[in-house]
Structure formats: C-alpha cells, structure tokens
Amino acid sequence: MLPGFGYARPRNLREAVHLLSAPGARVQAGGTDLLGCLRDGVFGVDTVVSLSGVPDLRGIRRALDGGLVVGAMTTLSEVAAPTDVVKGYPTLAQGAAAAASPQLRNQGTIGGNICQRPRCWYFRGDFHCARKGGEKCFAAEGENQFHCIFGGDVCFIVHPSDTAPALVALEAVVRITGPNGSRSVPAEKFFILPETDYTRENVLTAGEIVTEIVLPPQPAGTRGTYRKVRARGSWDFALAGAAVVATITAGKVERARIVLSGVAPTPWRVPDAERAIVGRRLNKRTVRDAAAAALKGAQTMSGNAYKVELLRGTVEEALLALA
Amino acid sequence: MKTPKLYFVDGAVPESPAPTDTPAPWTETRVVGKSLPRVDAYDRLSGTAVYPSDVVLPDMLYAAVLRCPHANARVRKVDGSLVERMPGVRAVITGDSKAADLRWYYTRTVFTKLFDPTCRFEGEAVAAVAAETPQQAWDAVRAITVEYEVFPFVADERKALEPGAPAVHDGGNRVGEPEKYQRGDVVKGFAEADKVLEASYRTAAEFHTPMELHGCVARWDGKRLTLWDSTQGVYGVQQRVASLLEMPLANVRVIGSYMGGGFGSKLQADKYNLIAAVLAKLTARPVKLFLTREETFLCVGNRPPAGMRLKAGVKNDGTLTAFDLTVLGTGGAYPTGGTGLVDWLVRDLYTCPNVRTEATDVYINGGPSRPMRAPGHPQGAWALEQMMDALAEAIGMDPVQLRLKNVPTVSQANEGQPPYTTTGLRQCLTEGAKAFGWDAVRRRSKGDGPVKRGVGVAAGLWIAGDGGPPATVIVKLFPDGSANLNMGASDIGTGTKTVMAMVVAEELGVPLEQIQIENADTGTTEYATASGGSKTVPTEAPAVRSAALAVKRQLFELAAEELKVPANQLYIEGDAVVSTKDPKVTKKIAALQGLRRRGLLIGVGTRGPNIEGKVINPFVAQFCEVEVDTRTGEVEVLRFLSANDSGRVMNRLTYENQVIGGITMGIGLALTEQRVFDRQTGKVVNRNWHDYKIPTAMDVPADMTSLPIDVPDPEANTTGAKGLGEPVTIPTAAAVANAVYDAVGVRVTESPISPMRLIGLIAARGKRG
Ligand SMILES: Cc1cc2nc3c(=O)[nH]c(=O)nc-3n(C[C@H](O)[C@H](O)[C@H](O)COP(=O)(O)OP(=O)(O)OC[C@H]3O[C@@H](n4cnc5c(N)ncnc54)[C@H](O)[C@@H]3O)c2cc1C
C-alpha cells in the first residue's frame, strides 16, 4: 500500500528544483521505480514532484558538435526506437531495449533509469540494511547470488541500470540542475561506490535533477554492442552484462571502452580488458585475453561465484559481436 | 494401496444421489470436440465479468492482516487498543479478542488458534483490522505493537533432522513415520540388472502465484453469511467455514462464479475467510479482505521442495529390474503432505517388478504447502525421467525406445494391479516422436560453436484425472428452446463453463449463445467438489450430459404426443424435433404446445460411479528442443510438443490452452522458479513477481504443439474424457533437463537450470564450446 503523500506538478525547471529542495520531496519521472519503492516502504516521502509538466525534458536532439542530447524524460522505448540513437549509439539503444519489459520501457525514462534505486532483495524487502541506515548488509552473509563481485564494501548491491554501462562506455555527460545552478558530470563520475557513500548510488544532492544526457560524436569506425545475461527472458535485471564501444580501423582496435553491468555497485569499467584489445585485432585469442583481464580482482561470496565464469562468457560474446 | 483421493481434505463428501441411467458413449459428435472459444470470453476480456476481487458492496469495509515477520516466534503481547481510535478503523481483532477465539485445522487433529501466539512461519496471522479504506486498514495494521519472542528457525529441510536443529513442533521435526512402499525384491532386482545407476535430484519449492489474489468479501444478513470468494470450490469453503463457525450449511453461502486462477492453492478455505467473517460480524458491515501479492508468497501454499535419491537397474535389452527411491521433503510448518505422491511415477509409470520407495516428510519454519498442479508428479518425473534418460544412455538405447519397452497395461502400484481402462502412453511416445521428428533431430549434430542444440523426451501419467461422484447438475429448457445450465463447479480458467455448455448443446441442439450458465454458488447451484485434480471434466461433463438427457427424454415424450411418433423414434436437428422414420414429420421445439404449457423442462443429472476393478489415468509424453549457450549457461527452449492421452478431446481450443499453460508452468520449474529463504532470518526474500521468476512470453517457445491422442475412453465415463490440466505439466521440466543434457552433456539434477547453476557445471565439466 502506498503511503500518503503530497503531489506537485511544476511547470518549469526552476519551480521543480525549488519544490525538490524541501526535505522529503522526491522526483518522479515515469514512476516505475519510485512508486515501487514507496509501496515497499524502502523510503518515505512527503511530496512527489512530477517532472511530467516540465517542458523540454523529453526528446532527442542533435547537438552542435554532431553528438546527441537525450532529455532525461525521454522514455526507454524512445531511446531504443530505430532513430539516431540506434544508428550512432547502438550500445545505448541495445541497453535501453534490454531493460525491463515493453510496458515499463514505454513508461520509464532514461533519467529515471540511471537514477533508479538498487534491486537488492534485502534493500527492497523487509530488512533494515546498511543502505537504509541499518547496521549491516544482509547480503554479505546471506542470499547473495545477485550481488556484486567488484567494488563491494559495507554494501554489495549491483547497479541495476542497463543504460548506465552504455553511457559510461560512450563517454556521455550527465547534465544536472539544482538549487545552486547547473553542472555537468561525466557518466563515469556520476555513479558512486559504497566506499564513497553507501546510502546513495550517484552524485546527486538534495534538489538536483538530471535534465539531459549528452552523447559526444563518435569517431568513424566506432562500433558498439551491449550483451546482457539474465535469469529470465524479460522483466529481469542483468546477472552480468557488457557494454562495449570500440573504434576499429584497418581491422585493428584503435580505442575501446568496456563497461560491465550486473557485477558491481556502479557501471564497472575494466581498463585492463580494454588494453588487452587496443592495437590488436578482435579474434578468439585477444577476446579471451580481454575477458580474462576483465575478471581480475573479482571477489566472490557464497552465492555469486558463478558470475566470474558468466562474465568471462559475456565479455567474450560482446567482443566477438564486434569482430 | 488404493489411489488416494487428493482433494477431499475435509473428510467425507456428501453421499451421491443415485446415478441416472447410463447412456451409451457418443459415436459421432456435432459440437463436442470442436475448437470453440470461451462462452464467457467477452466478459472476461471486456471486464464485465465480476470476480470476487471486483465485488464492491455499499458500506463495505476493507480489512488487512498483521502477519508475523519472523520465521519462528511467539507473540508475547499484542496491543491494538491505540489502533482502534485511528481514523476510519472500525474493528481490530487479535489473539485476545473473544470474537476471534476460533480454531484453525491443518488436519483433523492438528490445529492452532485463528491468531495463535505460536508463529511457526513468516506470515502467520497475528491480528487484523477493518477500516473504511484499504489505506486506513494498512496504516492501522502497521501501528499495532507486538512483542515477539524470536526463536532460532530451520528453513532447509535437509537440515531439519540434524542434531540440534530447532524443533518446529515439540515432538521434533518428523511429520510422522516415513511412508514406505515395496513390491518385489529390489536387492534381487539390482542383482539381475546389467547396469545400475544411482543419483540424487532435487526440485526447488515453487509458488502457485495465480493472477487473482487470494481473498473474499464477507457479508452478514442476520444469521446468514455470504462470502464472495476467489476459490476453486465453493462447497468446500462453505463446509469448512460453517463447521468452524458452528453454523448450519444453509446459512453459509459461498459465491465464486468467476475466479482468477488457483493452481491448487484455492482448493480449500483459508484463514482469511474466517477473519473477514468475524470482522464483518463485529462491524455489521460487509468486509473485503484480499491479500497482497507479497502475502500470497508466505501463507497460501507452495509446491514443496523434493530431495530424491533414485537407484535404478536395467538389463541391456531395456528391461527395468528395480527402482529404489528415497524422498526427503517438507510441507512447511504443518502436516500438509510435504512428500505426497512424489514417488508415484516411480511406482506406477513403467513396468518394473521390484520397487521400493521411502518418503520422509519433515517440518521447517516455512509456509504450509498446498496441492499444486499435479502434486508430487513433476518432482517425481524430474528424478525418474532423467534417470530413464541416463539408463538409456548406459545401455546404448534410444530414450524413447527404452520407455516404449516398459509401457505397462496394469497399474502396478494399485492394489491387485488392476488394468487401466485405456493407456495411450505407447501412442503418446510413438506418435509424439514421429510428429516431433525425434529420430532425425536426435542424430543431428549438436553444433560446432559455443551454442549447442539438444532434444529431450519425458513421459508421465497422472494418478487422478478419473473424476467421480458426487456431482449434481440441473439443465432447464425454456419454451423457446433456450436453456439454462446450473452447476456448482468453478471455472478456474480452464474453460469448464464452455465445455459443459458444449455438452448441453450436443444433446439438445441449443446454440451456445442460448445457454445461460449459473455456476459456483452454494446458494443457487448444485453440489460439486472443488475444481482440481484434473477431474472437473470427467466429473461434471457426465453429470451435465445426464441432466441434458433427462430434459431430452421429457421433450421427446411431449413431442411424441404432438407428432404421433413414439418417443424413441425422435431426434433433435437444429431447433426442431424430427422423426427418425420420416424427416418431414418434425416440429420446432419452440412450437411444442406441451412445452409451452409446462413453461419449463427440468433435468437433473448426477455423476455415476466409476468402473470397478480398473484404473482411469491420463498419460502424456513431451518432446522439446533447446539451445544452450555454453559460455553463459543460458537455455533457450526452441520448441515443445505434448502428446496427451486424456481420452476424448472435448474442445480442441481449451485443450490446447491447457497444454500450452502446462508447458509454460513446467518451463518455470525447469528454468526459473524457486523459493529462496534468507539463511539468516528464515524470511522469504523473493516474494514478488520480479524476484520470483515465473516465465514470461520470452521464456517459452512460440512453437508449442498439442498433439491429442484423441481416443475416447468408454469405460471412464459417459463422455469418454479423462483429465488433462495436470498431466500437461508433469514431464515438462524433466524433458527440458534431458534436452540440456543432450545439448551439452551436463546433467542438471537440481532445479532450476538457471544460468547461475548451469554455467558453473559447464565450466567444471569442461563442456565450454
Ligand atoms: C519489474 C521491473 C524490471 C525492471 N528491469 C530492468 C532492467 O532489466 N534493466 C533496467 O535497466 N531497468 C529495469 N527496471 C527499471 C526500470 O527501467 C526503471 O524503473 C525505469 O527506467 C525508471 O524510470 P522512471 O522514469 O519510471 O523513473 P522513476 O520511477 O520516476 O524514478 C526512479 C528514481 O529516479 C529518480 N529520478 C527520476 N528521474 C530523475 C531525474 N531526472 N533526476 C533525478 N532523479 C530522478 C526518482 O526520484 C526515483 O528515485 C525494471 C523495473 C521493474 C519494475
């Protein structure tokens, strides 16, 4: 049962930011994640501030430099639709298409997707866990088959978003507006690890709203893909995933970014794996080396050791898809 | 050993009325067997169908239940006094309330209080509130203060018998003596075998999780109670509620004409029925109590997990020599048959002279189980059918051939080894294999790359599916030739109403649109047992037929007078009665004077007894093809074929619905579904539709074929139909497991075959492609 709350539908960004600066206010984009959290009592709310009345937050437009600007209120379906995103940024389009279910993609937005709260069943469930201000992470000693093998500390969530790894791989920039004005943060710096703050998943502070995501133009010869493995064919989060963006010229990888999903509390970039393919051709051997490099430093718990082998296969398949 | 009657949990069923005389089976049919859409499809799809959860009454209150958040605890103190003054709250009941001082029975002798201080599983009811709005009810429930004494728990049946395991009940964690069965001599059997294999298997616990939540609306009119209940059987609920509230049956009316699925979890009354009734009584207002989705994962049943160790012996020619099966299972915190029927297929499916089974049922601090679509059978098939596959490989025989070699004609596990009335197992296997293209695909290459293809087969039978008395049905014929069908049976989504109307149409020629159907209402419809056990068609359809025939007989008597033709020389063609001797001697039903004068013809039909000395079972064989990505452990089911012998096909479309639904559910058991307890607290962590993964459209193949072995069983009943709804899901998971083995050579003996499990096994066995 949803708790009681006030509801506001501001008409412009300034008003929205103002309303959101009040304690207990929460942004609502599509609401697909927010309402679930409220219903499950994950956190409380005084006022739900909907962004649906704020103009100019929805839609995709061409930037002056040839890149794309995606409004935060653009739905995942729109991001995945056969448009400029698919042509220029297939990694992102595939990420959006791999998220959730058709209904959720029609309603859920890209802004909401990168700001959604973790899906850890302890965090969402009837457990007073560390991320909710409690004493401990229940996953550490509990049912942790869906938890992280990289970057865990105090809390062992994985970041739930399928678009976030693509954004990091594409070197996207997140534009933010808040009570103190606007700022731009590279996607790679937008997400934060538990060791920085285990009660938040990103850098947003009170009253701040993601307004746009800027996708820089990609050099010629750039290809991309997103490979996601899940326990169920739809309506399910990644057990492991790999977003890859690589510029390949004359058969050799010139530049590459490989970012993993489902294995860490943030989209998890693996520079060692990137180095393993840069300057080389993508073939069985280099791909195997890169996958092995991607696994370095993995720390498993009682139930998630499978993720190591799974990740190896996922990275290999993602890279081979670009070969 | 007699076939246990699964669903009559509440003891003796009412005496059946004497059966009306037995008509000969149909030779040719005009309506029955056709592919016809549901008679209520429009109402269901447009939303005009009123399900119990849609019922809204003037002045109605909403109730919510406070449930124990601990796996094992004792309520020391519960205080609802402050809550009573909260806005909108009209009643609060706890274990201390006199009005709620009622008993709840798990068996005839095992009972607790409605709100018992001893909470043996997470989700046990502790208190309840009725308020003006659902929000107020939930606010109040959250505000009730409870002091719990929390105890250690046991949530894993494999640990329940370990020394020092917390005792769920004072007497320890054994539900009773292990259930044992033996025929022949297994030691001798294994000695005669050329190959003996032994393996352990386990299926995870599953949840029913039907679309409509569990719940009811309760209203009192003086001393009479009416419940609109989402149930599979209104009469069972009436009986239970009346007995617990010590009321005459006549004063308890239960209505459930529409209901949104149950899969066995709604075969019985639930505590919520009593809670709603008590709150409605206290407040003198109607009360609606529907559980939340999360609650339904805790306290309205599950398919118990099954640990199985199976040893099997076979000769090189494929003759089975012995089976030895040990089962460990749990129905949760109360005796609900945690191991029931898990061993039945090992006992009965294949010819085998030497069989021994032993099943140990233990308690854990988990929600009590309830029958779930073919109780015990998919679990047993998971072990037996994987073992058959392994045996076939061990002796170098095709798995279909090994099964064919051991098709029995008698039910070996029933006392006296009586014959089956019909067994289509052989045809299911041969015709299924042919239609699937088994021989060719089996020999095909598995693929050179990392993605491998494989095919699998598995078979089964269902212990019930015979149906039987009691059942009473009334068919009325109006003077314009339209009809009314009145039966107590619930249509649990299977198309019962449609099939029964087709039987009326078959006998009386009335178009389906002109048959009004009243069903599942103890106040106005006739007696029926709960819809479950795949017995609804074989139970109700003969009763419907007999009621329609009773009408027909009277109609012909009336027509005989008017047409001056003997009644036994008449038949119905369209909307007219016609002479068999001269088709020109005919009269429209609507024009019969006698019918007009009478105003209405009434036919009462009952279900006669089943044939003595024979066993009526449906049979099935399923074939599937899968693709396994050996780099990720992902399994994609590419196609499925189900060959079913369920006797006569009553409606090709609803038949196919069951097949597709059964396969879908079986794929859930095979690949995605499992209850997960938190090992630290004993709480269920996946109590929602995201974390508990029932298959989506993306997890089932578009290519699903239903191949009916359409051979009416004249000895089964007067319609020739046997049960279908459960056999369709029995071999599914095992067939998938066998196909995965065929593809990658890895035997996954524990369900589900998730990427999480499979990738580890593939890597460990060096099967990565
Ligand atoms: C069953 C289920 C399965 C799912 N599976 C997947 C999956 O496989 N992969 C995947 O990636 N996602 C998945 N999702 C998540 C889904 O994609 C998100 O719910 C959706 O993208 C969120 O978008 P929204 O617009 O509805 O966000 P909302 O629910 O409105 O908001 C989500 C959160 O972000 C905050 N927020 C929203 N917009 C902004 C903004 N512009 N600035 C700052 N904060 C903001 C809100 O306050 C809230 O906390 C699943 C969700 C469900 C319910």
Image (cartoon, rainbow, N blue to C red):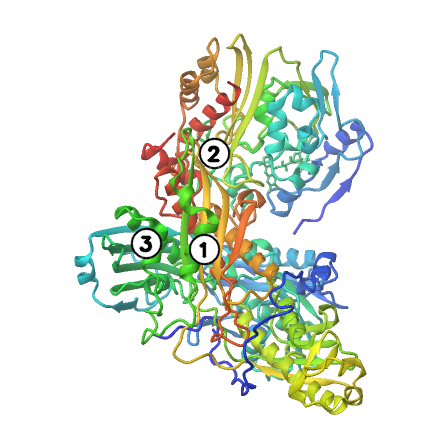
Q: Residue at x 56, y 34 (%)?
A: A160
Which disc, if any, is residue B576? none
**Foreground tag (2 vs 3):** 3
Judging from the image, what secondary structure is the residue with disc 3 in?
A: helix
**Residue tagged 2:** A156
Q: Is mark 1 within 8 Å of ligand 1?
A: no
Query: The residue under label 2 is which amino acid type?
Result: Phe
For badge 1, the amino acid type reads Glu
Q: Quadrant of ligand 1?
A: top right
Q: At numbered mark 1, what does the secondary structure look like: helix, strand or loop?
A: helix
Q: Nearer the viewer, mark 1 or mark 2?
A: 1
Q: CA distance from mark 2 to mark 3?
A: 49 Å
| Image point (44%, 28%), residue name | A313
The residue that appears at 67% across and 49% down in the rendered structure is A2
- The image shows residue B20 at horizontal and vertical percentages of 56, 86
Question: Which residue bears the numbered disc 3?
Answer: B402
Please state the chain letter of the residue tagged with numbered disc 2 in the rendered image: A
Task: Determine whether B16 is above or below B654 in the image.
Answer: below
- Mark 3 or mark 1: which is in front? 1
Residue B754 pos. (x, y %): 44, 42
Tell whether B711 sits left or right of B281: left
Q: Position of residue A288 (x, y in %)?
A: 41, 20
Residue with the mark numbered 1: B431
Numbered disc 1: what chain? Answer: B
